[in-house]
Amino acid sequence: MSVFTTFYSAFGNRCPRCHNGRVFENNNPYNLKNGLTMKEKCPNCGLKYEREVGYFYGAMYMSYALQVGLFVILYFLNSIWWKLENLTILLIIIVLVISLFPITFRWSRILWIAFFTPFDKTLLKGKND
Ligand SMILES: [Zn+2]
């Protein structure tokens, strides 16, 4: 599992196995109608995204890691450059975590799938012939 292929699929809403099919119905995470709706399986390679009931509970760890990473980066930047008061930086972090929720939700699920499903180069469109 290469880090680059994993993040490519997470950021691009692509199936971690084939990098062609989409994981979520809509590419826009802020679409209120279906921005957080997942497809059942990959339309290209047929990978079933939710392997078993409760499979995505593990994605909460990914979500936690992403949000703590954001928290640490902002706190580090603040202590070096911005020098804002603790309450101000806390409010900024809370607003960012809430407003970025649809993105972290999607990335954490795709990263969780990619954690167990390696990228298969032979499934790339046009490269397996
Ligand atoms: Zn696929």
Image: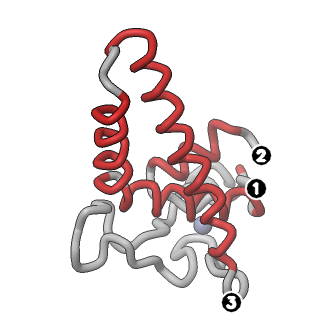
Looking at the image, the residue that sits furthest to the left is: 32
**In the rendered structure, which amino acid carries the disc numbered 2?**
Met
Q: Earlier in the sequence, mark 2 or mark 3?
A: 2
Badge 2 crowding class, 10 Å Cα cut-off, few under 14, some 14 to 19, many 20 or more, is few
* Residue 17 in sight in this render: no
Residue at 31% across, 70% down: 35
Q: CA distance from mark 1 to mark 2?
A: 5 Å
* Residue 42 image offset from top left, x and y in percent: 56, 74
Left or right of residue 111, residue 78 in this image: left
Q: Which mark is residue 118?
A: 1
The earlier-in-sequence mark between 1 and 3 is 3
Q: Residue at x 64, y 80 (%)?
A: 50
Q: Residue at x 23, y 68 (%)?
A: 31
Q: Are marks 1 and 2 in contact (CB under 8 Å)?
A: yes
What residue is rendered at 57% in x and 43% in y? 7
Front residue of 10/120: it is: 10
Q: Is residue 27 above or below residue 53?
A: above
Q: Which residue in the protein does label 3 denote?
A: 53
Q: Are marks 1 and 3 in contact (CB under 8 Å)?
A: no
Check if mark 2's residue and mark 3's residue have beta carbons within 8 Å: no
Find ligand 1 in the image and state its quadrant. Answer: bottom right
- Spatial CA distance of label 2 from label 3 is 24 Å
**Can you see residue 12?**
yes
Q: Nearer the viewer, residue 74 or 120?
A: 74
Task: Please rate how many residues cluster around mark 3, counting C-alpha atoms within 10 Å: few if below 14, some from 14 to 19, many from 20.
Answer: few
